Amino acid sequence: MNSMATASARRISPLFSSCGVTSLHPPPQLEASTTVISVSTRSISYRQPLRSPAARRRDFLGGIALVSVLLIDSPDSKAREVEVGSYLPPFSSDPAFVLFRATPTDTPALRAGNVQPYEFILPPSWKQTRVANILSGNYCQPKCAEPWVEVKFEDEKQGKVQVVASPLIRLTNKPNATIDDIGSPEKVIASLGPFVTGNTYDSDELIETSIEKHGNQTYYSYVLETPYAATGSHNLAKATAKGNTVVLFVASANDKQWPTSQATLKAMVDSFQI
Protein backbone atom coordinates (compact mmCIF):
# COMPACT_ATOMS: atom_id res chain seq x y z
CA MET A 1 0.00 0.00 0.00
CA ASN A 2 2.76 2.50 0.86
CA SER A 3 4.51 1.93 -2.46
CA MET A 4 1.20 2.29 -4.27
CA ALA A 5 0.45 5.62 -2.54
CA THR A 6 3.96 6.88 -3.25
CA ALA A 7 3.66 5.98 -6.91
CA SER A 8 0.28 7.67 -7.15
CA ALA A 9 1.66 10.76 -5.46
CA ARG A 10 4.29 11.06 -8.18
CA ARG A 11 1.57 10.99 -10.81
CA ILE A 12 -0.70 13.61 -9.21
CA SER A 13 1.82 15.95 -7.56
CA PRO A 14 2.03 18.25 -10.63
CA LEU A 15 -1.67 18.97 -10.17
CA PHE A 16 -1.04 20.17 -6.61
CA SER A 17 1.74 22.49 -7.69
CA SER A 18 -0.17 23.99 -10.61
CA CYS A 19 -3.66 24.54 -9.23
CA GLY A 20 -3.68 23.66 -5.54
CA VAL A 21 -6.59 21.20 -5.71
CA THR A 22 -7.02 17.48 -6.04
CA SER A 23 -8.78 15.79 -8.91
CA LEU A 24 -12.48 15.11 -8.43
CA HIS A 25 -11.74 11.52 -9.51
CA PRO A 26 -8.97 9.85 -7.45
CA PRO A 27 -7.13 6.87 -8.98
CA PRO A 28 -9.47 3.86 -8.99
CA GLN A 29 -7.10 1.57 -7.12
CA LEU A 30 -6.85 3.98 -4.18
CA GLU A 31 -10.58 4.60 -3.97
CA ALA A 32 -11.32 0.90 -3.81
CA SER A 33 -8.87 0.05 -1.06
CA THR A 34 -9.54 2.55 1.74
CA THR A 35 -11.49 5.63 2.75
CA VAL A 36 -8.43 7.72 3.65
CA ILE A 37 -5.30 8.42 1.60
CA SER A 38 -2.00 9.60 3.03
CA VAL A 39 0.11 11.22 0.33
CA SER A 40 3.70 12.23 1.01
CA THR A 41 6.07 14.14 -1.21
CA ARG A 42 9.36 15.79 -0.46
CA SER A 43 7.72 19.12 0.41
CA ILE A 44 4.17 18.40 1.60
CA SER A 45 2.12 16.02 3.64
CA TYR A 46 -1.43 15.82 2.35
CA ARG A 47 -4.27 13.88 3.97
CA GLN A 48 -7.55 13.87 2.03
CA PRO A 49 -10.66 11.80 2.90
CA LEU A 50 -12.24 10.21 -0.12
CA ARG A 51 -15.74 11.47 -0.91
CA SER A 52 -18.67 9.36 -1.97
CA PRO A 53 -19.82 9.42 -5.62
CA ALA A 54 -23.01 11.20 -4.50
CA ALA A 55 -21.02 13.99 -2.81
CA ARG A 56 -18.76 14.43 -5.84
CA ARG A 57 -21.81 14.61 -8.10
CA ARG A 58 -23.41 17.20 -5.80
CA ASP A 59 -20.27 19.37 -5.94
CA PHE A 60 -20.11 19.03 -9.71
CA LEU A 61 -23.73 20.14 -10.16
CA GLY A 62 -23.16 22.99 -7.71
CA GLY A 63 -20.24 24.20 -9.83
CA ILE A 64 -22.41 24.16 -12.93
CA ALA A 65 -25.07 26.20 -11.14
CA LEU A 66 -22.48 28.79 -10.07
CA VAL A 67 -21.12 29.18 -13.60
CA SER A 68 -24.67 29.56 -14.91
CA VAL A 69 -25.33 32.40 -12.46
CA LEU A 70 -22.17 34.20 -13.53
CA LEU A 71 -23.05 33.94 -17.22
CA ILE A 72 -26.64 35.14 -16.91
CA ASP A 73 -27.12 38.75 -17.99
CA SER A 74 -28.46 41.17 -15.41
CA PRO A 75 -32.04 42.44 -15.82
CA ASP A 76 -30.56 45.76 -17.04
CA SER A 77 -28.82 44.03 -19.95
CA LYS A 78 -32.04 42.51 -21.32
CA ALA A 79 -32.76 45.20 -23.88
CA ARG A 80 -36.04 45.42 -25.71
CA GLU A 81 -35.77 43.62 -29.04
CA VAL A 82 -38.23 45.98 -30.73
CA GLU A 83 -38.00 49.25 -32.59
CA VAL A 84 -37.64 52.20 -30.24
CA GLY A 85 -40.40 54.06 -32.06
CA SER A 86 -42.89 51.64 -30.53
CA TYR A 87 -42.24 52.85 -26.98
CA LEU A 88 -40.23 56.09 -26.98
CA PRO A 89 -41.96 59.47 -27.42
CA PRO A 90 -41.48 61.50 -30.62
CA PHE A 91 -38.85 64.23 -30.46
CA SER A 92 -40.78 67.48 -30.38
CA SER A 93 -38.33 69.39 -32.57
CA ASP A 94 -38.10 66.76 -35.31
CA PRO A 95 -40.70 64.00 -35.88
CA ALA A 96 -38.07 61.94 -37.73
CA PHE A 97 -36.59 61.04 -34.32
CA VAL A 98 -37.73 59.77 -30.93
CA LEU A 99 -36.26 60.83 -27.58
CA PHE A 100 -34.46 58.49 -25.19
CA ARG A 101 -34.23 60.00 -21.70
CA ALA A 102 -32.40 57.73 -19.23
CA THR A 103 -33.89 57.15 -15.79
CA PRO A 104 -32.72 55.20 -12.72
CA THR A 105 -34.67 52.16 -13.94
CA ASP A 106 -32.38 51.88 -16.97
CA THR A 107 -28.93 51.13 -15.51
CA PRO A 108 -27.19 50.26 -12.21
CA ALA A 109 -25.06 53.43 -12.37
CA LEU A 110 -28.10 55.67 -12.67
CA ARG A 111 -29.69 53.96 -9.66
CA ALA A 112 -26.46 54.33 -7.69
CA GLY A 113 -26.26 58.03 -8.57
CA ASN A 114 -22.87 57.62 -10.29
CA VAL A 115 -24.28 58.91 -13.56
CA GLN A 116 -26.72 61.77 -13.93
CA PRO A 117 -29.69 61.24 -16.30
CA TYR A 118 -28.81 61.84 -19.95
CA GLU A 119 -30.78 62.02 -23.18
CA PHE A 120 -30.37 61.81 -26.94
CA ILE A 121 -32.49 61.26 -30.04
CA LEU A 122 -32.78 58.14 -32.19
CA PRO A 123 -34.48 57.20 -35.45
CA PRO A 124 -37.63 55.22 -34.57
CA SER A 125 -36.41 52.15 -36.49
CA TRP A 126 -33.40 51.57 -34.21
CA LYS A 127 -33.37 48.86 -31.53
CA GLN A 128 -31.81 48.75 -28.10
CA THR A 129 -29.25 45.95 -27.82
CA ARG A 130 -27.98 43.94 -24.89
CA VAL A 131 -25.01 45.07 -22.85
CA ALA A 132 -22.97 42.11 -21.64
CA ASN A 133 -23.22 41.84 -17.87
CA ILE A 134 -19.44 42.06 -17.47
CA LEU A 135 -19.46 45.42 -19.32
CA SER A 136 -22.54 46.91 -17.67
CA GLY A 137 -21.01 47.91 -14.33
CA ASN A 138 -23.68 45.87 -12.60
CA TYR A 139 -21.27 44.19 -10.15
CA CYS A 140 -19.06 47.16 -9.33
CA GLN A 141 -21.54 49.88 -8.42
CA PRO A 142 -21.33 52.19 -6.64
CA LYS A 143 -17.52 52.22 -6.85
CA CYS A 144 -16.35 51.05 -10.26
CA ALA A 145 -12.65 51.39 -10.99
CA GLU A 146 -12.96 50.95 -14.76
CA PRO A 147 -15.29 52.38 -17.45
CA TRP A 148 -18.53 50.59 -18.22
CA VAL A 149 -21.19 50.68 -20.93
CA GLU A 150 -24.50 52.25 -19.99
CA VAL A 151 -26.75 51.59 -23.00
CA LYS A 152 -26.42 50.54 -26.64
CA PHE A 153 -28.65 51.00 -29.70
CA GLU A 154 -28.12 50.01 -33.32
CA ASP A 155 -29.55 49.69 -36.80
CA GLU A 156 -27.89 47.32 -39.24
CA LYS A 157 -28.23 49.81 -42.10
CA GLN A 158 -27.15 52.96 -40.24
CA GLY A 159 -24.74 52.07 -37.44
CA LYS A 160 -24.74 51.98 -33.66
CA VAL A 161 -24.46 54.25 -30.63
CA GLN A 162 -23.46 53.64 -27.04
CA VAL A 163 -23.00 55.56 -23.83
CA VAL A 164 -19.77 54.83 -21.94
CA ALA A 165 -19.16 56.08 -18.40
CA SER A 166 -15.76 56.38 -16.75
CA PRO A 167 -14.86 57.15 -13.13
CA LEU A 168 -13.57 60.71 -12.96
CA ILE A 169 -10.57 59.55 -10.91
CA ARG A 170 -9.14 57.85 -14.01
CA LEU A 171 -8.64 61.26 -15.61
CA THR A 172 -8.09 63.66 -12.70
CA ASN A 173 -7.70 63.71 -8.93
CA LYS A 174 -9.87 66.80 -8.60
CA PRO A 175 -13.31 65.95 -7.14
CA ASN A 176 -16.36 67.05 -9.17
CA ALA A 177 -14.11 68.37 -11.93
CA THR A 178 -15.63 69.73 -15.13
CA ILE A 179 -14.32 68.47 -18.42
CA ASP A 180 -12.47 71.79 -18.77
CA ASP A 181 -10.63 70.99 -15.54
CA ILE A 182 -9.46 67.65 -16.96
CA GLY A 183 -7.74 69.28 -19.91
CA SER A 184 -8.01 69.97 -23.63
CA PRO A 185 -10.20 67.92 -25.99
CA GLU A 186 -7.05 66.20 -27.25
CA LYS A 187 -6.02 65.20 -23.73
CA VAL A 188 -9.44 63.79 -22.91
CA ILE A 189 -9.73 61.74 -26.10
CA ALA A 190 -6.23 60.35 -25.54
CA SER A 191 -7.60 58.73 -22.37
CA LEU A 192 -11.02 57.79 -23.69
CA GLY A 193 -10.10 56.92 -27.28
CA PRO A 194 -9.95 53.14 -26.74
CA PHE A 195 -13.54 53.27 -25.49
CA VAL A 196 -14.54 54.99 -28.73
CA THR A 197 -12.81 52.51 -31.02
CA GLY A 198 -13.27 49.36 -28.96
CA ASN A 199 -9.54 48.55 -29.15
CA THR A 200 -6.75 51.09 -29.65
CA TYR A 201 -6.52 54.79 -30.33
CA ASP A 202 -3.98 56.70 -32.42
CA SER A 203 -3.88 60.50 -32.34
CA ASP A 204 -3.62 60.47 -36.15
CA GLU A 205 -7.20 59.16 -36.23
CA LEU A 206 -8.55 62.40 -34.74
CA ILE A 207 -9.87 64.55 -37.59
CA GLU A 208 -11.77 67.32 -35.82
CA THR A 209 -12.58 68.59 -32.31
CA SER A 210 -14.98 71.25 -31.05
CA ILE A 211 -16.15 72.67 -27.74
CA GLU A 212 -19.72 73.64 -26.93
CA LYS A 213 -21.59 74.76 -23.84
CA HIS A 214 -25.17 74.17 -22.73
CA GLY A 215 -25.78 76.28 -19.66
CA ASN A 216 -22.99 75.43 -17.21
CA GLN A 217 -22.15 72.13 -18.91
CA THR A 218 -19.20 71.91 -21.32
CA TYR A 219 -19.02 69.24 -24.03
CA TYR A 220 -16.10 68.11 -26.20
CA SER A 221 -17.06 66.74 -29.63
CA TYR A 222 -14.91 64.60 -31.92
CA VAL A 223 -14.77 63.29 -35.47
CA LEU A 224 -12.52 60.28 -35.93
CA GLU A 225 -11.50 58.17 -38.91
CA THR A 226 -10.61 54.81 -37.41
CA PRO A 227 -9.83 52.16 -40.07
CA TYR A 228 -8.84 49.53 -37.51
CA ALA A 229 -11.51 50.20 -34.88
CA ALA A 230 -13.68 47.36 -33.62
CA THR A 231 -16.66 49.74 -33.52
CA GLY A 232 -16.39 50.86 -37.15
CA SER A 233 -14.18 52.88 -39.46
CA HIS A 234 -16.10 56.11 -38.77
CA ASN A 235 -16.73 57.39 -35.24
CA LEU A 236 -18.32 60.51 -33.81
CA ALA A 237 -18.12 61.16 -30.08
CA LYS A 238 -19.17 63.66 -27.45
CA ALA A 239 -17.84 63.79 -23.88
CA THR A 240 -18.65 65.68 -20.71
CA ALA A 241 -18.05 65.37 -16.97
CA LYS A 242 -20.54 65.68 -14.15
CA GLY A 243 -20.27 64.63 -10.52
CA ASN A 244 -17.74 61.82 -10.23
CA THR A 245 -18.12 60.53 -13.79
CA VAL A 246 -17.05 61.31 -17.34
CA VAL A 247 -19.75 60.32 -19.83
CA LEU A 248 -18.98 59.58 -23.47
CA PHE A 249 -21.54 59.23 -26.26
CA VAL A 250 -20.24 57.36 -29.32
CA ALA A 251 -21.83 56.91 -32.76
CA SER A 252 -20.15 54.44 -35.11
CA ALA A 253 -20.57 53.27 -38.70
CA ASN A 254 -18.68 51.11 -41.17
CA ASP A 255 -17.75 52.17 -44.70
CA LYS A 256 -20.99 50.78 -46.15
CA GLN A 257 -23.22 52.57 -43.63
CA TRP A 258 -21.41 55.90 -43.43
CA PRO A 259 -22.36 57.58 -46.76
CA THR A 260 -26.08 57.47 -46.02
CA SER A 261 -26.08 57.63 -42.23
CA GLN A 262 -23.49 60.25 -41.30
CA ALA A 263 -26.04 63.10 -41.11
CA THR A 264 -28.30 61.00 -38.87
CA LEU A 265 -25.43 59.96 -36.61
CA LYS A 266 -24.25 63.55 -36.31
CA ALA A 267 -27.76 64.68 -35.31
CA MET A 268 -27.80 61.98 -32.63
CA VAL A 269 -24.42 63.05 -31.24
CA ASP A 270 -25.36 66.72 -31.32
CA SER A 271 -28.51 65.96 -29.30
CA PHE A 272 -26.71 64.21 -26.46
CA GLN A 273 -26.80 66.08 -23.16
CA ILE A 274 -26.68 65.36 -19.47
Image: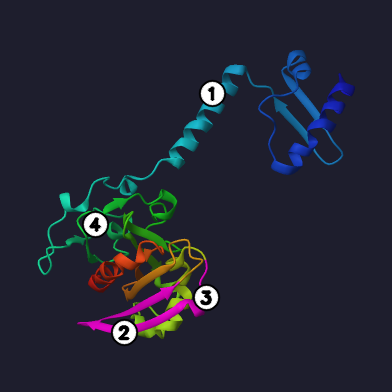
Q: Secondary structure at mark 4?
A: loop
Going from the N terminus, do you reach mark 3 or mark 2 first? 3
Going from the N terminus, do you reach mark 4 or mark 1 first? 1
Going from the N terminus, do you reach mark 3 or mark 1 first? 1
Say which residue appears at 27% left-offset and 70% top-offset. Answer: 263
Q: How many marks?
A: 4
Q: Secondary structure at mark 3?
A: loop
Q: Position of residue 65 (x, y in %)?
A: 47, 32
Classify residue 153 as left or right of residue 54: left
Identify the residue under disc 4: 104
Going by the numbered disc 1, the residue's amino acid type is Arg
Judged from this view, the residue extending furthest toward the top is 32
Q: Which residues are magenta?
A: 200-225
Q: Which quadrant of the rendered structure holds the N terminus?
A: top right
How far is the residue under mark 3 from the one under mark 1?
Answer: 51 Å
Q: Position of residue 122 (x, y in %)?
A: 22, 61
Going from the N terminus, do you reach mark 2 or mark 1 first? 1
Identify the residue under disc 2: 211
Identify the residue under disc 1: 58
Going by the numbered disc 2, the residue's amino acid type is Ile
Res 10 → quadrant: top right
Q: Position of residue 35 (x, y in %)?
A: 71, 17
